[in-house]
Amino acid sequence: MFIEIKGVQFVNKGAELMLASVVERVKQYWPDAEIVLEGNPFSPYKSRALLGAYQKLSLRKNVLDLNSFAYYLPKSVRNYLKKWGIVTEADIDVVLDAAGFAYGDQWGALKVTHLGGELNRYKKHGCKYIFLPQALGPFTREKDIKTLKASLPNASLICAREEDSYNNIRGIIGDASNLIQMPDFTNAVKGIVPDYWQGGDKKVCFVPNSNMIGVKNRNLDWKKNYISIMQMLIERVKQQGFIPVLLNHEGEGDRDICDQLNALFDNSIEVIEESHPLKVKGIIGASKAIVCSRFHGCVSALSQGVPNLGTSWSHKYEQLYREYEVSELLIDPLASEDALVESMDNVLNDNQEFVNCINKNADKYKAITEEMWSRVVAVVNG
């Protein structure tokens, strides 16, 4: 059986954490299955090869999608390609879509067009397509809605990650039997604390996100105030006797923000570039607190009971903090300096009310993640 893990990569640590989570489950539930990954600039050959993954040959370039021709290739040709570690769409038995957040108005319409084509072809040829928990929508483009209305019923299972995403899809296909709501699934995977991370109980990790000041963020207040708010919070951490650390969760864009912030403090702040996603989660879990703008960084903190001040450029953050019943830990871009100081102090001063609430919901959502995987296994094996 060939299982494609779709939408993951090796630069964004959240996406790589999702990949690690799915690989762990595939090995657990289907030990004889072969993993397939599609190559892209953020998923280089050497990284895929280390996983022992087959490469999916994509017959697509921009608007041109010729993947339907893969089904007409003789089996002898496809078997020959497999000897070189290459498979086509026609060889895939199961797709586990772990894109995280890739379909909606904030992304190009071409993604929905290609998705619709895949769903229709896979259904026709007996491949099971499963959307693992992810943010979906909103969808307001008429063409996208038409495409999704026709193709989403062909998915074997759609796991919307939160209520807004669930309603975005429900508004298109109604109360479909293949649509359910499940939380982010990286909460269940265990992190690894690297040897070099010492004295974490005195350290506060700051995880920036270039999207906070990028074109995808429609909140102009955040674009204007993001750097100054992060600077203010770092200053407060230092005043309280803790050590701020900058943790790069994704590539060059986030590194640029790390450098901007560090320059405001004469480059005196440690900047961590950790390539292993489980070690990134381990660092977060072994910290005093975290100020985070990356969704999976927030999940890594909350799922391990670490108090976490968050920022938001998408509805997925608001919903996450509502689920953990700590919406007050999500920062307002127009908050006064006094309010920001109070918020920072709340996560530094061992506020047991927050910790108990976070731990209670961490256990709850880990149990729901196990339910989600049971549903996925039933669909794949059914």
Image (cartoon, helix red, strand yellow):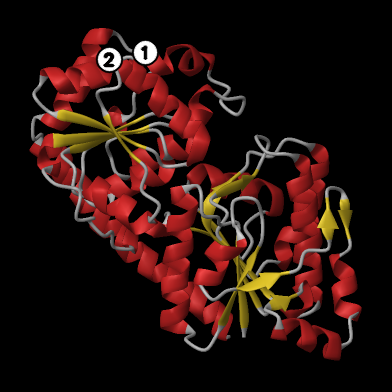
Quarter of the N terminus within the rendering? bottom right
Q: Residue at x 36, y 69 (%)?
A: 370
Q: Residue at x 34, y 58 (%)?
A: 278
> Residue 113: where, in percent of width, then height?
80, 50
Badge 1 amino acid: Ser
Q: Which residue is mark 1?
A: 228
261 left or right, relative to 82: left
Looking at the picture, tell me which residue is in the foreground, 291 or 56.
56
Does 140 sit above or below residue 276? above
Density class for disc 1 (Cα within 10 Å; few <14, some 14-19, many ≥20) is few
Q: Is residue 136 above or below residue 28?
A: above
Under mark 2, the amino acid is Met
Q: Is residue 149 visible?
A: no
Distance from the alpha carbon under mark 2 to that under mark 1: 6 Å
- Element under label 2? helix
96 horizontally vs 119: left or right: left
Tag 2: Cα neighbours inside 10 Å, few (<14), some, or many (≥20)? some
- Say the numbered circle drawn on residue 232: 2
In front of the other: 102 or 66 = 66
- Tell me: 274 left or right of 221: left
Residue lying at 42% horizontally and 18% vertically, measured from the top left: 226
Residue 219's disc number: none
Say which of 80 and 314 sits in front: 80
- At 10% from the left edge and 21% from the top edge, which residue is drawn? 240
